[in-house]
Image (cartoon, rainbow, N blue to C red):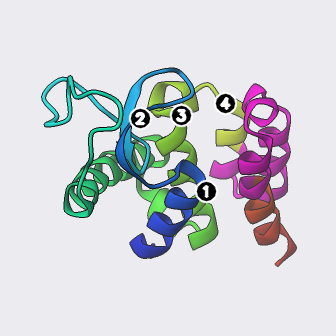
């Protein structure tokens, strides 16, 4: 998978913020959707504290490595054999939701495992996630439907 393309998709979906801000759950965040945790240099910083591009890149590399490990855990060795649009979609969903929440998408995961891209897209549309982040989830569904069409 092209990591630069994944970074572009995630930066578009998550935003790219050069400062500490509060996300939709009022959790301190920075960079490309990086949830600030104890142990991070930014932990305890006030909203508005500047974060360098280099630091954002380092956080992203760490976050995306963990995300791709989650992708491999969910889909085993199959993940690397999926078309790039499926890999991008799965990685973006896991990045957004985290492994425990993504694991609740049982029917979507089953459809992906069977490479039924149309059903995988339909399962995304039939979810609370779709109602909460419609535009973003619709982009994911369309990416998967594109695979179904050929």
Task: State the SS at label 4.
Answer: helix
Residue 42 lies left or right of residue 33; in this view the side is left
Q: Is residue 138 magenta?
A: yes
CA separation in Å, label 3 and label 2 = 19 Å
Location of mark 4 (residue): 106
Contact check, label 1 and label 3, Cβ < 8 Å: no
Classify 10 Å Cα crowding around label 3: few (below 14), some (14-19), many (20 and above): few
Q: Quadrant of residue 85?
A: bottom right
Sequence order check: which comes first, mark 1 or mark 4? Answer: 1
The label on residue 97 is: 3
Point out the frontmost of discs 3 and 2. Answer: 2
Classify 10 Å Cα crowding around label 1: few (below 14), some (14-19), many (20 and above): many
Sequence order check: which comes first, mark 2 or mark 1? Answer: 2
Q: Residue at x 85, y 33 (%)?
A: 126
Q: Which residues are magenta?
A: 111-140
Point out the frontmost of discs 1 and 4. Answer: 1
CA separation in Å, label 2 and label 1 = 25 Å
Location of mark 2 (residue): 21
The label on residue 126 is: none
Give the quadrant of the C terminus. Answer: bottom right
The vertical placement of 62 against 45, above or below, is below
Location of mark 1 (residue): 89
Sequence order check: which comes first, mark 3 or mark 2? Answer: 2
């Amino acid at each position: 998978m092209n990591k630069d393309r994944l970074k572009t998709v995630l930066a578009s979906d998550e935003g790219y913020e050069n400062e500490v801000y509060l996300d939709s759950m009022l959790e301190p965040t920075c960079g490309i959707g990086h949830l600030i945790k104890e142990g991070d240099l930014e932990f305890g910083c006030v909203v508005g504290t500047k974060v360098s591009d280099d630091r954002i890149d380092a956080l992203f590399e760490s976050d995306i490595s963990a995300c791709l490990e989650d992708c491999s855990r969910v889909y085993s060795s199959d993940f690397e054999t999926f078309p790039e649009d499926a890999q991008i979609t799965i990685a973006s969903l896991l990045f957004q939701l985290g492994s425990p929440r993504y694991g609740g998408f049982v029917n979507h995961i089953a459809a992906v495992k069977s490479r039924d891209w149309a059903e995988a897209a339909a399962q995304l549309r039939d979810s609370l996630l779709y109602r909460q982040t419609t535009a973003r989830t619709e982009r994911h569904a369309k990416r998967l439907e594109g695979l179904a069409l050929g």
